[in-house]
Image: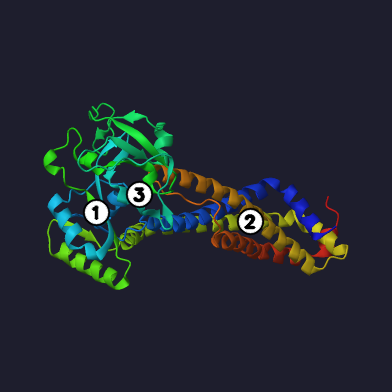
Amino acid sequence: MTLWMIIRNSLRQHALSTGITAVSIGLGCGLLMAVWVVNFQTQRAFKNVTGGFDSILGPRGSQLQLVLNSLFHMDSSPGLVNSVDYQIFRKKYQRFYQAAVPIAVGDNFKGYRIVGTTHDLFRTEHTPGQRYELAVGEFFIQNEKQWNKEAVIGDTVARKLGLRLNDKFNPYHGLNFAPNQKPHKDEYIVTGILKPTGAPADRVIWIPIEGLQQMDGHDLKYSGDVSAVLIQMSEDPTARGFGMNSLDSIYNKGTDHLTFVKSTDEVVTRLFEQFAWAEIVLRWVAYLVAVVAAGGVLASIYNSMNERRREFAILRALGASRGTIFSIIVLESAVIAAIGAAIGFVVYAVIMVAAENTLRDEIGVTLHLQEFHNIMVVVPLGLIALGAAVGIVPACKAYSTDVAQNLIPQS
């Protein structure tokens, strides 16, 4: 009888305790891997979503709020940039940037934000190396003198609301949908549906900026104002650095009604730093679950030692060395941990699917479920090593089994 046959028979004999212990290890393994990978991919996705927009000009307020509202289409708009300030920026500081895309927000359709913008947005990248593309239809017609009631919708909007090409809808005022609220009189037609971007753009309805500024029910005295300006700084490193510092000084220190976000990446990084404690807590919970499960392996095998003394004595009588007995117990403990690690990948997959669906539907950020991460090797191997380590204690007890005493027939 080989070592593996002995281990297999033992696991079968104690199937219930083995299964419970393995599942506990699997929960810890899956949770730990998922916390690590979700945090890594989410941070990367949030930074990638900024696309080529390095900076943002907006009304005075929180830079984080401005980034969340302008790039992630979350939170409320902090206010407006009046038309005079917007035109001054475009003309006076043109040497600092290569693209300045205005956006206007303030309406929705069944909970999905309507954002007014220009065609310049669709010429930029929504994520590094990826540009906006249409699945069907065409982009809305841009005409400053007479705006067209046309809309381009994101993939999530199309799927969730069932909107198709040439469908018509009436926007609702405000960023939050109220079913009992009367919609605007203006009726828009869907002229295009974007291909999935894996970015918040999937959850947006895009219309000409003039349409949102001059929509029925909106005060015409604000018709030239914008909610924010998304800025791609100059590609020249010298001009880029000088421009960022100059605009930071001009708007953040020289005005009391405008805010310039110098670096969108830095703001996103600060956002994740604010919630770092949550990741640490989840990670320690996963560690605790894994350690408790490892303790379960130790207790399960150690408690079975008394009933297995005769088994070990017989093996010794048949020629097995003390080292062989020791190895059986350590390997058995490691195998239970390995089964748990395998279950951990199932737990990991379930958590990742749930996280991906939630982030995609609520924020528009997409996770890559099949992407490999080093932690997917480190955690399972670490738990198997931990399982083998806790098996040393019962293995020492088995090692010291007295052959003669335990071969005596039991009454």
Is label 2 in a helix, a strand or a loop? helix
Q: Are marks 3 and 2 in contact (CB under 8 Å)?
A: no
Q: Spatial distance from mark 1 to mark 2, Cα to Cα?
A: 59 Å
Task: Give the image location of residue 268, x and y in percent.
Answer: 34, 58
Task: Give the image location of residue 20, x and y in percent.
Answer: 62, 47
Residue 136 in view in this figure? yes
Type of the residue with mark 2: Val
Task: Give the image location of residue 14, x and y in percent.
Answer: 71, 48
Residue 401 in view in this figure? no
Reply above or below: 145 against 330.
above
Name the foreground residue: 331 vs 107: 107
Q: Quadrant of the N terminus?
A: bottom right
Is label 1 in a helix, a strand or a loop? strand
Query: Residue at left 70%, top 63%?
Result: 330
Reply above or below: 198 against 375.
above
Query: Residue at left 51%, top 48%?
Result: 352
- Say which mark, if any, is on residue 122: 3
Question: Number of labelled discs?
Answer: 3
